[in-house]
Image (cartoon, rainbow, N blue to C red):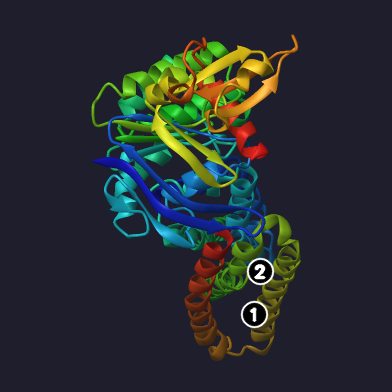
Amino acid sequence: MNAIELSHLHKSFGDFAIRDLSLAVPGGTICGLVGENGAGKSTTIRLLMGALRPDSGSASVLGTDVSSPAFRAVKEDIGVVLDEAYFPESLHAMQVGKILSATYRQWDQALYEHYLARFSLPEKKPFKDYSRGMRMKLAIAAALSHRPKLLVLDEATAGLDPIARDEILDLFNEFTRQEDHTILISSHILSDLEKLCDYIAFLHQGQLLFCEEKDTLLERYGLFTDSQENLDCFQPEAVIAAERNSYGGVRALVRRDMAPAGFQMEKPSVEDIVLFLVKGAKNA
Amino acid sequence: MKALILKDFYVLWRHFRYFLALLLIFSVIPKSFSATFIVIYAGMLPYSAMAYDERSKWEQLAAMLPYSNRDIVLSKYVFGWLCTLAAAVLSLGLQALASSLWSALLSPDFRVTALAVCSACCILALTLPMMFRFGVEKGRMVMFLMIFLVCGSAGILNAMVEAADHSRLVFPVLVVAGLPAVALVLTAVSIPLSLRFYLARQQ
């Protein structure tokens, strides 16, 4: 079963629109949502959480249409972390716990306190005095303490130092050890997504350019670093995008299956693929 | 909804301490205007909670949690009603205590306090939809209207009581019966309107 299914979603804000967005995230997987600032990642997350009504199309999460009244009960099984924690600043962690225990029927206070201890979060310190890292850790502790089946993370690791990020990525990996647990994570830190994700979905200017298994994606493309003359030997449709390097040569993202025999290619990172695809889309 | 009211209570916890001090002072001042004013003012506490919500962008998170839009809107009304009722009960208790200790002070007037509660409900019903429509930041004009309504209604109630005392007339029956009815009608219209404005703002 797909944990998330978006079908032909449209949402227009005048100068920006999500257009014909269809995306399926299989249950038990981790899907990374990537794209530039303003590509529509947060809007997509708001649409799939039913916080925004689409102009057309449909969205279902954990098998329930997000526009139906039944979706409110399904939210019990979804943990959400946004780019900021968004708790009122005068609250402290214990008060946040009490509010959320009155919000979620399956809230586990002992688990929440375990996460507070694990992240070394002071229980009575006002939220406004927390550092950025502490705030995000509190938001993550809150999102996990009602034992969700789906985690939706919108830039949840942004602004964290590498150690805190690593700690949190470990936690997400732990979360997906249960086979019915799914994560949708949007992030600008593509190296994190490469470590964590099974699927990569790429949004560009409100349109989904692809959603594919990470390994398939990495096998499909190669990085070709050579002279312009040798790059010209490739069919034009095999070259996704190219840039001049500082040695007078070129560096290009190419399709391996369309490459002429005998040329050496490096394995690209997800970041290389995304950067060249954006470049290719801009030049198209 | 319990969670949302609890959240507002925690957010305003520090605020409440100052408010209780004001309540104590205003309740024992030997003029009914001050006691009336503080009860009506208590009904405005949801706006402080909304200002904190707006500052922390709480609404963005609330939209992701299992709260219905109706609960989010209704919780502000319920919070206002609870604050007003609590202020009324505390004010009456303090007035009774103060008048038993110092006989020079007036004994508490239940009718005036009840009318102050109704006035607070009317003001809440008139101004909350505007706050949901424009937000607390942009709704400064509504704040002026609120201050005018709070002071004005406390003054009017006080003048009515004094007039009734001087002329030894029965407190105007029309006001006693009419104000709760007006509060009910205004609230019945106000809640769906607030919900509509809230939904429009979310989209």
- Please state the horizontal and vertical placement of residue B90, each as a whole percent of the image: 52, 56
Left or right of B47 on screen, residue A211: left
> Looking at the rendered structure, which numbered label has been put on residue B161?
1
Depth check: give the residue in front, B170 or A30: A30
- Mark earlier in primary sequence (2, 1): 2
Callout 1 secondary element: helix
> Is A108 positioned to the left or the right of B105 in the image?
left
Q: A21 above or below B182?
A: above
Mark 2 and 1 residues: CB-CB less than 8 Å, in contact?
yes
Left or right: where does residue A96 sit relative to residue A105? right
**In what quadrant of the picture does the N terminus of chain B appear?**
bottom left
Determine the image quadrant of residue A249: top right
Residue type at mark 2: give it: Ser
Residue beneath the point at 46% across and 25% down: A258
Q: Residue at x 48, y 48 (%)?
A: A46
B129 and B161: which is toward the camera = B129
Q: Position of residue A77 (x, y in %)?
A: 30, 40
- Disc 2 designates what residue? B32
Where residue B68 sits in the image (x, y, percent)? 40, 57
Q: Mark 1 — on which chain does it sit? A: B
In the rendering, at what x and y percent does residue B74 appear? 46, 62
**Residue A101 in view of the camera:** yes
